[in-house]
Image: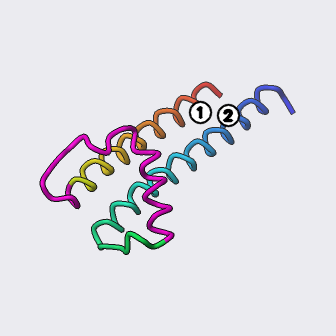
Amino acid sequence: MAVGTTVRRGAGLLASLVRLVGMLIVAVLVIHIVLTLLDANPANGFTIFIRDLAEYFNLGLGNLFLPAEPKLAVTLNYGTAAIIWGIITAVVTRLIRRIG
């Protein structure tokens, strides 16, 4: 197997891994939004787990928008973070594939 083929295969694998991780982060943020909008039990273990993960991945945007309605605030702030994570994931994945 040629070195170039190995590098391309490795870059493709890395790009796929980066894409998977990025999409999982986006999914956590979206699930947090959905649980909030549907009034999920805030004391439930799954809800707490998702909320804590979303807090970790919100890029500091947890209080970017401050509307009076808390559900709207979560939707705007975490939705913005999800969009940014999606863009970052797409750009980094494309760069890895191009370099490889």
Q: Which residue type does callout 2 highlight? A: Ala
Residue at (63, 45) in percent of width and height: 17
The residue under label 1 is: 97
Residue at (35, 44) in percent of width and height: 81
Using residue 84 as the reference point, say whether residue 3 is left or right of it.
Answer: right
Residue at (48, 53) in percent of width and height: 53
Magenta-drawn segment: 45-72
The dot on residue 11 is: 2
| Location of residue 80 (image quadrant) | top left
SS under mark 1: helix
**Tag 2–tag 1 contact (CB < 8 Å):** yes
Q: Within 10 Å of the Cα at label 1, are there few (<14), some (14-19), or many (20+) other Cα atoms?
A: some
Q: Where residue 91 appears, x then y in whole percent?
A: 46, 33
Residue nearest the viewer, comparing 74 with 6 = 74
SS under mark 2: helix
Q: Give the CA distance from mark 2 to mark 1.
A: 6 Å
Q: Where residue 47 appears, x then y in whole percent?
A: 44, 67
Q: Within 10 Å of the Cα at label 2, are there few (<14), some (14-19), or many (20+) other Cα atoms?
A: some
Q: Eyeballing the image, is 66 above or below 9?
A: below
Is residue 56 a member of the stretch shown in magenta?
A: yes
Quadrant including the N terminus: top right
Q: Which residue type does callout 1 highlight? A: Arg
Between disc 2 and disc 1, whose residue precedes? 2
Is residue 80 a member of the stretch shown in magenta?
A: no
| Location of residue 4 (image quadrant) | top right
